[in-house]
Amino acid sequence: AGGRAPVTGASFDAQFRSAREMAAKGEAFVWNLPSNVRDQKRHIVGLDEWQACGPRYKTRKDFVGSAMDAGPSASVVDLADRFRATLAGNFSTLHLRRSDALTHKAQKRKRCGTKVSTVKTYVDCVYPPPRCGPTRCKSKADAERRDTLVVFTDERDQRYLDELYDALKSTGRDVVFGDAALRELAGDGGRDNYFVFAASLVVREASFPRLAMDR
């Protein structure tokens, strides 16, 4: 399938090892997981890879995703690195989840709102902006903290995004919407959303601080 080798093996744990080996070599692969993948944990619970995940994962009875995590592919890391190269110096990230989160009961009760003013208040509180003007900062400490805030969000309403950009930018921060930048760098019009999302996780992992407003 598009130059990607299929994962083979007579059993689930054999397929798991095969996938890990190909991932370690940087090879692209396709693994057609069975519909009862969540039940397969009993077949891999004795594997060294599973045990190495630690007690937290050994007790999570309904989740095997972490045990199957082979890490980001070379192409995902390359996309993330190319994006990071466009940033000047240090950067922080904000993951802002809206879409389905807007229908969540906590949102309806206004406890976890994501309107622009609420997001700005959260960001300014958790990570106060440096006191910097267009050309200089008030102190060396402020200058060292001047960075780019990369925003990752599933929101597509351009009016909301424009208002959010202006609000976050008003405090003197440099602001970049990471999803759009990654889609452009991906070179396929961003049609592979999973590819872009995987790269965004690598970028977020490399940032400090990592801010989040999830459901």
Image: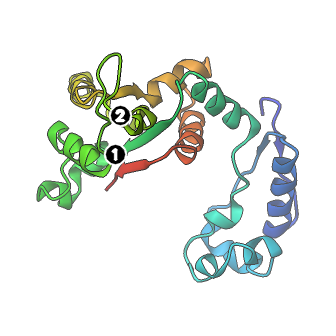
Q: Are marks 1 and 2 in contact (CB under 8 Å)?
A: no
Q: Position of residue 113 (x, y in %)?
A: 18, 50
Q: Position of residue 97 (x, y in %)?
A: 34, 45
Q: Residues within 10 Å of mark 2 (few under 14, many from 20)?
A: few
Q: Position of residue 131 (x, y in %)?
A: 28, 33
- 75 left or right of 127 in image: right
Q: Position of residue 59 (x, y in %)?
A: 58, 83
Quote the CA–CA distance across marks 1 and 2. 34 Å
Q: Residues within 10 Å of mark 1 (few under 14, many from 20)?
A: some
Image point (65%, 31%), residue name: 81
Which quadrant does the C terminus fall into?
bottom left
Secondary-structure class at tag 2: loop
Which residue occupies the extreme front position in the image? 139
Give 4 or 137, whichever is nearer the viewer. Answer: 137
Locate residue 37: give its quadrant.
Answer: bottom right
Secondary-structure class at tag 1: loop
Give 37 or 60, whichever is nearer the viewer. Answer: 60
Image point (76%, 37%), residue name: 74
Image point (68%, 61%), residue name: 34
Disc 1: which residue: 97
Locate residue 137: give its quadrant.
Answer: top left
**Residue 139, labelled with which disc?**
2
* Mark toward the viewer: 1 or 2: 2
Amino acid at circle 2: Ser
Q: Is residue 100 above or below residue 67?
A: above
